[in-house]
């Protein structure tokens, strides 16, 4: 059962916290510790065992989950298997929140709805193409087919299942994504408002890609991880290094594409909130507060031994983003590093989280990879009640926050955390 703190919670909410409505979920917050946890697991070889994630409050499943199953399917069915994983997880752990992967720039043909558009020539203007005047640095054809399957749409094989071996291994005789070669394709963000058969790319992207029956259209899917981005300096992220050259894109093209991408994603985030969902990119992991600043995939702890006092003075403020955003606080060391099965400074991370968190917050891990075990200390099931106010510096370098069922203290002078239960 979720506990929201009754009248005192309402007083705290209205007197101490100033929300920016567009940056928080539209569902009720919770102070309950076990529900205020987050991980991003996956198992490339098959489904993630629901017993291995039981107890975590928010679970975000990566596209690589069950990859060695869906890569061999004919045709590939990544989105359908992600939904199956969600159903398995929520059935085993009622109350768990689950998010799924959607790429924001790559048109991945192992997603059924994407493949339907890539293989329909009517929609060719929605996708970026190879420059026909250049010899590309990546293959345009899949020679496992006879005759070879080729496409004029730009695609690479940087993170792509292949036959017999790739980032996912396809079954003989070749990878099956319909009438096109397997690869990572690209939407053209400038085509967002281009209507084909009565539907714009933007309308399709939101309604049929993000909110289809395997995604936000299913009530068990509560949010998303929107991967990758466009930049003027580098072009599309996580693509073969010659992608911009192979597409013949000019600096002006990159400015237009990157600008359109930012505008398009603003539409997406707005619609995600409007429909009662949320996304990893809308979390606050310490990034800037300008439009377009998004959460890190590889967050680090916001409070470190070296920065402890200065950082807590900043983050304990009523004006801190920890009070007005959905905070994601990473276990040490963060940065997409470390062994999640052995938490090195759990007591400090938990105490600092409890000191600075607002009504919307989660403690856990960013992206670490697949097939990992996650240590889950018993303290994550503790009932600390709800805070009676913000944290304060009670003496030089010593910070304290009172909760209704605990007192939390961090001594930055010796990096010692103390949580004293009061009930």
Image (cartoon, rainbow, N blue to C red):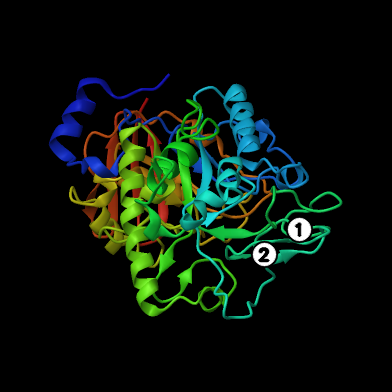
Residue at mark 1 to residue at mark 2: CA–CA distance: 8 Å
Mark 2 is surrounded, within 10 Å at the Cα level, by few (under 14), some (14 to 19) or many (20 or more) other residues, namely some
Q: Seen in the image, is 262 located left or right of residue 240?
A: left
Q: Secondary structure at mark 2?
A: loop
Q: Secondary structure at mark 1?
A: loop
Residue 365 seen in the current view: no
Q: Return the disc, 1 or 2, that comes first in the chain's sequence.
A: 2
Q: Tell me if residue 378 comes above or below residue 179 in the rendering.
A: above
Residue 181 found in image quarter: bottom right
Q: Is residue 38 above or below residue 33?
A: below
Q: Residue at x 66, y 36 (%)?
A: 52
Q: Is residue 370 left or right of residue 255?
A: right
Q: Which residue is mark 2?
A: 157
- Tell me, yes or no, if residue 255 can be seen here: yes
In x, y percent, where is residue 74? Answer: 76, 42
The residue wearing badge 1 is 162
**Residue that appears at 41% across and 76% down:** 233
């Amino acid at each position: 059962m979720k506990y929201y703190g009754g009248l005192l919670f309402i007083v705290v909410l209205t007197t101490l916290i100033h929300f920016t409505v567009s940056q928080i979920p539209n569902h009720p917050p919770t102070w309950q510790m076990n529900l205020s946890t987050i991980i991003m697991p996956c198992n490339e070889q098959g489904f993630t065992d629901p017993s291995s994630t039981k107890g975590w409050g928010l679970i975000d499943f990566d596209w690589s989950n069950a990859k060695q199953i869906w890569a061999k399917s004919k045709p590939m069915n990544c989105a359908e298997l992600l939904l199956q994983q969600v159903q398995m997880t929520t059935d085993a752990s009622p109350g768990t929140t689950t998010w799924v992967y959607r790429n924001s720039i790559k048109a991945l043909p192992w997603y059924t709805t994407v493949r339907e558009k890539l293989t329909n020539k009517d929609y060719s203007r929605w996708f970026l193409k190879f420059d026909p005047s250049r010899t590309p640095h990546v293959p345009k054809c899949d020679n496992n087919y006879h005759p070879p399957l080729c496409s004029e749409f730009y695609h690479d094989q940087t993170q792509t299942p292949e036959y017999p071996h790739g980032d996912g291994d396809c079954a003989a005789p070749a990878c099956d994504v319909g009438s096109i070669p397997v690869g990572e394709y690209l939407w053209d963000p400038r085509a967002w408002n281009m209507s084909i058969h009565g539907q714009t790319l933007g309308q399709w992207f939101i309604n049929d890609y993000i909110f289809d029956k395997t995604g936000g259209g299913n009530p068990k899917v509560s949010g998303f991880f929107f991967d990758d981005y466009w930049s003027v300096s580098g072009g599309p992220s996580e693509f073969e290094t010659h992608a911009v050259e192979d597409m013949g894109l000019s600096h002006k093209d990159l400015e237009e594409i990157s600008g359109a991408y930012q505008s398009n994603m603003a539409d997406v985030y707005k619609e995600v909130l409007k429909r009662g969902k949320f996304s990893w990119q809308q979390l606050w992991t310490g990034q800037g507060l300008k439009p377009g600043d998004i959460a890190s995939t590889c967050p680090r702890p916001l409070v470190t031994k070296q920065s402890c006092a200065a950082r807590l003075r900043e983050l304990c403020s009523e004006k801190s983003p920890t009070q007005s955003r959905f905070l994601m606080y990473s276990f040490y060391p963060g940065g997409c590093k470390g062994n999640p099965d052995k938490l090195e400074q759990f007591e400090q991370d938990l105490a600092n989280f409890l000191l600075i968190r607002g009504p919307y917050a989660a403690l856990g891990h960013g992206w670490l990879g697949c097939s990992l075990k996650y240590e889950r200390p018993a303290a994550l099931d503790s009932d600390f009640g709800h805070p009676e106010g913000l944290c304060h510096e009670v003496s030089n370098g010593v910070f304290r926050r009172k909760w209704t069922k605990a007192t939390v203290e961090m001594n930055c002078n010796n990096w010692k955390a103390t949580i004293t239960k009061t009930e």
